[in-house]
Amino acid sequence: MCQSAGSDRLDDMKSSPRLARLTLRDRWRRTRLRAYSGTLTSIYHVVSLRPGLWRLMARSYHPAFDRIAARHALLACRLGSVDIPAYRDLLLKSGLLLEHGRPRARGLADFPETSKQNYAGCYDEASRCPDGRMYRPGVTVDESSGSTGRPYNWVRGPQELRAIYRNVAGYVSLVFPGEKLFVINAYSMGAWATGTTTGNALSRIAMVKNTGPDLEKIIDTLAHFGPDYDYIVTAYPPFLKHLRDRLDAAGFDWERYRLRGMVGGEGMTEALRDYLEERFEQVRSGYGASDLTIGIAAETNFTVRLRKQLAADRELRCELLGPGEQRLPMIFHYNPLETYLEVNGQDEIVCTINASTCLQPKLRYNVGDEGMLIPARRVEALIARDPGRWAGCRAGHDRMKLPLLLVFGRKDSTISYMGANLYPQDVEYGLYTGNPMAAQIERFSLSLAELPGLESRPVVNIELRPEADLGAGGAATLAARCRDGVLAHLTRVSRDFAESLSEDPAAADLQVRVFSHGEGPFRGPGTIKNVYLTKEPA
């Protein structure tokens, strides 16, 4: 199986299989599958045609719809076996096509998972489209950020984009109500999917200014248009922190304005949310991937309150997540009728987009995130057994009945430390929880330093903001605060680490290095999103 993703010569190594000549039986089967899938897609699109109808569907979702969604996902894979050259070739190489061309797979789980490693990195863009035909008017080419290595290109057709716009607009109108919505789109513009797609989607329900991640443009925009609008700033979480710190430094009159934040692209801790909501009225996150779509899932008031409850209630966390789980996942609602999700044996999220309008179908695609799927009704029933818990989570309930997606993040974003996995979110808690110097931090990364005697220690690298002025001894004070914060968080959430700390004081030897802006591991051009794991210099 191809594993060439990330190679500098990736494009030269991709294959371009042609769709083999289909038998009359296969052509008839393809026609029936296309008609069936198209009918289901059309019904769903009618239901979600307006944001109001989308909200009604989200609030009246019934678990019986899960079976319809699963059937549609199976249908999409079967259609791909006769319709998509790359997918048909993958099935052939996997031994999953019979001699007469029908797939051996009977259930959805019998079809192979696809990923960058075995699919997108092995087959060119056209061969991953129905009939191997990519070119058509209105197609948009997006590019992933390259935060995991080499950027990839992803194509989307006009019907597919309109469906994404409807989903994003429906969600925002539900979670961010307002009479005069004004969106300041601070995602990076250009070929990257999130920025341009978000701007186009939200123009359906709001005024939009696509500033990109330019702090001064945003400040000028707020000053020019004044406080008479309900502002929503869309951005990556770290940039929203930069904006808060920059507005504070400029003496911005927060009391006169109504500012809310919609973030995505990476996880966000409750420590960072609390820090942002000291100024922003509300900050909510969406979940997506350039590989798939930007609108897979989204936070609501209920999911945020549930997450905060999990952080404080160890018994509930054990009941919902299982004993011994130290991580606090992001929690979202998702719509199986649009994106059908599974969790495989390695606890990774596998996604099938249920839409015949998808130009480059995503069939059991594994983006590499760990997660869990839980019906909303089950969570509500679990919480409602305790009146105190229910009162905390019910306040501001959005009445959403869509199932819940719990996302822990990428498996490869950790460093092992004294029996515990050190995740970027653990560091983020240490940086922002009760830290009066948090405004001086631009970003951070993790690395592993080798010490004499064949020992190694994790290192938290901190980059200061360009204008940061810590004064004499300030860098050491910041490093100490961050070290204490990370150790305190690990002690709270990981029993293994707490036990190691009590038995061996050397477990507290967590190194924190503070760098001026653009120095050390932060030197050189970066990617759009923060890179949280870096290598130690040789």
Image: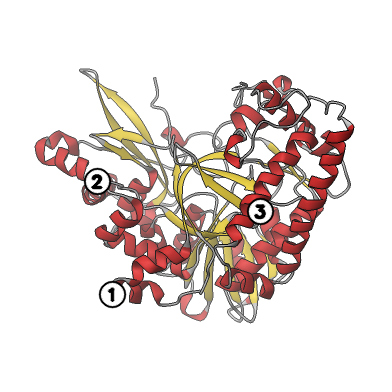
Amino acid type for the residue under numbered disc 1: Gly
Mark 1, Cα crowd under 10 Å, few <14 / some 14-19 / many 20+, is: few
Location of the C terminus by quadrant is top left
Distance CA(mark 1)–CA(mark 3): 41 Å
* Of callouts 1 and 3, the N-terminal one: 3
Relative height, residue 259 to residue 191 (above, below) = below
441 relative position to 28: left or right: left
- Label 1 belongs to which residue? 388
Q: Amino acid at mark 2?
A: Ser
x and y percent of residue 405 in the render? 49, 55
On the question of residue 470 being in view, the answer is no
Local SS, label 2 = loop
Q: Quadrant of residue 165?
A: bottom right
Q: Is residue 534 left or right of residue 91?
A: left
Q: Please report the residue visible at 42 percent of the width from the left and 63 percent of the height from the top.
A: 378
Q: Assess disc 2: are there few (<14), some (14-19) or many (≥20) residues with their C-alpha within 10 Å of its C-alpha.
A: some
Q: Give the SS element for disc 3.
A: helix
Q: Is residue 391 above or below residue 15?
A: below
Q: Which residue is at the front of the view, 225 or 413?
A: 413
